[in-house]
Image (cartoon, helix red, strand yellow):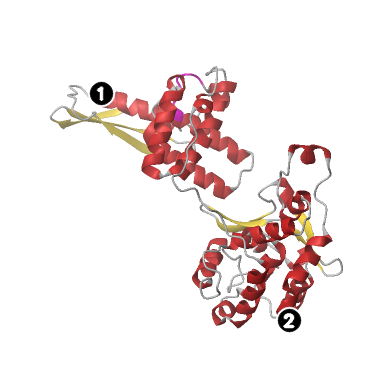
Amino acid sequence: MPRGRPPLRIGQHGKITRKDLGKGVWLARCRFRDDDGVVRIVERRTPPGRRDQYGKLAEDELLEHLDSRRTPSEDEVTSSTTIAALVRTYLARLEEEGRAAATIDTYKFAAGKLEGKLGGVRVGEATARRVDTAIRAMSKTHGPTMARQAKTILRGALGLAVLAGALDSNPVRDVSPIKSKTPPAGARALTADELRALLIALDDSEYCKANDLVDPITLLIATGLRRSELLALRWADVDDEAGTVTVSGKVVRAKGAGLKRVEEAKTAAGLRTIPLPLFALEVLKRRADQPQHGDLGVIFPSTAGTLRDPNNFGKQWRKVRDDLGVKDTTTHSFRKSVATLIDEEGLSPRVGADHLGHRHVSMTMDRYMSRRRTHSAVAQLLDRVVAEKNE
């Protein structure tokens, strides 16, 4: 019985064929098994402006491209490894370490743009000047935000090269900072008066009622949660007797997998239990008595009973915020508002960090003081802030 073609190993290519296209231009092609295990046909032509008598130049182009497609393991990183291959190794490592899917998708997008500026450069050629030039070009072409993302990726990737002994030092450390002409202002914090007026406006808004924004926005005001944390809250996370809610996960969109609820937070401090103001407990009690959509047990599902998309939730808020009298706010504004109220009340930064799930307050506090406590003072403060709503 005749045997079939032997399978390719990951990172291995098959026989290279050359095809004469005429006028000194050749096409070189082969089968190649990529890092995802899929075998693809890869091809390259003679470089423009060069005459290729027998197709050798086209084959050289193909081999160089195949080398950049291979993702080396960390112990295979050498001065000849391309930046593109090294970046893929670094991103794979981040995935293995459990970095958020959304972050990985963002980094992969930035890495794709970076490859056009620096991907063919080899580790041994990655001087500070060359890296700085590439980052500046990224900023000019794609904006400072993506340039900073590319710089972060390069710092981590070239750090692997240092660990492997392929570089003596990381050239990214000598690259100058990327500054925006107009630094982002960030989310605007609402005042106590604005929060009280907003709670009244929410109750009067037909759009908010029709799109189930009243209760979730009220809970954002009451807790300062991230919207991904809010939409991941389950009824099982609420303790009516203690008057608390436990943040035990978040809703994320994974590329190719859609929305999912993951049992993790942005930081380790993000998994926390916080007391709820009385007005928030009243909202949850009323909502619990209403018909529930779906069987996921989340408090704020979509109209179909599935997980609610944080991005769509943000779009709905942006559509109605002007009508509610809080122009230029985002769902993150409520988080910043809670932090501002905590500060104005004279509560310590530690109280704010524990309540909001921030990792760092200061080096001393992080290393020598206990963390992840519950602070009833925050719930009492928020109750006082909105007390006038029902008067």
Extent of the magenta region: 78-83
Looking at the image, is 181 positioned above or below residue 133? below
Quarter occupied by the C terminus? bottom right
Percent across and percent down for residue 238 are 78, 66
Residue 79 painted magenta? yes
Image position, residue 175 (x, y; %): 48, 29
- Tag on residue 57? 1
| 121, 367: nearer the viewer | 367
Residue 80 in the image: x percent, y percent? Answer: 45, 20
Q: As shown in the figure, which amino acid type bears the numbered disc 2?
A: Asn
* Quadrant assignment for the N terminus: top left
Label 2 element class: helix
Horizontal and vertical percent position of residue 121: 40, 26
Is residue 322 left or right of 18 when viewed as pictured?
Answer: right
Residue with the most extreme right position: 241
Residues at marks 2 and 1, CA–CA distance in whole angstroms = 79 Å
Choose between 53 and 254: the one closer to the eye: 254
Side (left or right) of 108 relative to 380? left
Q: Give the camera-side residue of 6 and 303.
A: 303
Q: Relative to 318, is 203 above or below?
A: below
Sequence-first tag of 2 and 1: 1
The residue beneath circle 2 is: 390
Which residue shows up at 60% across the image and 61% down it? 333
Q: Main secondary structure of the magenta part?
A: loop
Disc 2 versus disc 1: nearer the observer: 2
